[in-house]
Image (spheres, coloured by chain):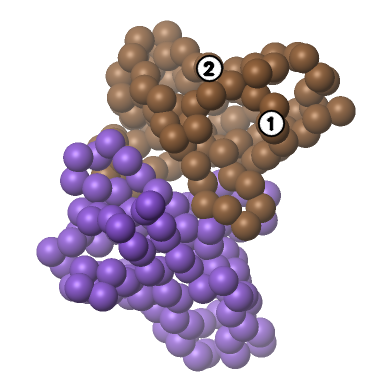
Amino acid sequence: DGGITQSPKYLFRKEGQNVTLSCEQNLNHDAMYWYRQDPGQGLRLIYYSQIVNDFQKGDIAEGYSVSREKKESFPLTVTSAQKNPTAFYLCASSTTGLLGPQHFGDGTRLSIL
Amino acid sequence: SQKIEQNSEALNIQEGKTATLTCNYTNYSPAYLQWYRQDPGRGPVFLLLIRENEKEKRKERLKVTFDTTLKQSLFHITASQPADSATYLCALADSSASKIIFGSGTRLSIRP
């Protein structure tokens, strides 16, 4: 079955540590996205990529970095510069950019040790 | 600033009744409005999309309306079932496709 796979499901970060969240899709979608979800708040866009080797900052890109070397993969690195990284991170993909339906993975929950 | 508001309180509905969820927005001119369902610990699942020039969209037991004058969308689930219990999110995208904003969601509980 086609879909988006995020790993790991749970991740713990120590102070001053960078961590990378994995996102892989086999839907052959050009566009991929990373969102952050905090309790009681809407999803907030961190980064998005419309095509391989290109990506744009979303609303809350500070403290995060991404790469898009392959169409299927869009990893997110949470750097030590992100002072409040505890959240539920969601990866999504679409064929039509932000205007159309997005297919989401089941998220990675990041916590600070 | 741009803002989306969904029913802040959880909605509890008797099985078989129609559930109606609200999405209001301010300081925004969306071209597309989407509704998603999210179960605990899972990613959102796309349900319906409606464009600014469409008044209503239906899919099985689901119906969405979009009133750009009132700046409001209503999401209806008819003949509700306990399996419909979840959090429902609305999302707005503008025509430039450069921005999308999500509401914080409404938690819906359908009691047998």
Q: Assess whether mark 2 and mark 1 are in contact (beta carbons under 8 angstroms).
A: no
Placement of B91 over or under A18, stated as above or below: below
* Residue A67 visible (yes or no): yes
- Residue A56 - label: none
Q: Using the rendered view, name the quadrant where residue A99 is placed.
A: top left
Q: In the image, residue A23 lies at what x, y percent?
A: 54, 25
The residue tagged with tag 2: helix, strand or loop?
Answer: strand
* The C terminus of chain A sits in image quarter: top right
Q: Chain of mark 2?
A: A
Q: Which residue extends farthest front?
A: B1
The residue lying at 65 percent from left, 18 percent from top is A81
The residue lying at 46 percent from left, 87 percent from top is B18
Q: In the image, residue B4 lies at what x, y percent?
A: 42, 60
At label 2, the amino acid type is: Ser
Q: Using the rendered view, name the quadrant where residue B22 is placed.
A: bottom left
Q: Colour of chain B?
A: purple
Placement of A2 over or under B46, stated as above or below: above
Question: Mark 1 or mark 2: which comes first in sequence?
Answer: 2
- Residue A65 - label: 2
> Which residue corresponds to mark 1?
A85
Q: Colour of chain A?
A: brown
The residue lying at 32 percent from left, 41 percent from top is B99
Q: In the image, residue B44 lies at what x, y percent?
A: 51, 51
Q: Chain of mark 1?
A: A
Q: In the image, residue A90 lies at what x, y percent?
A: 55, 38
Q: Which residue extends farthest right?
A: A113
The residue lying at 36 percent from left, 22 percent from top is A56
Placement of A100 over or under B31, stated as above or below: above
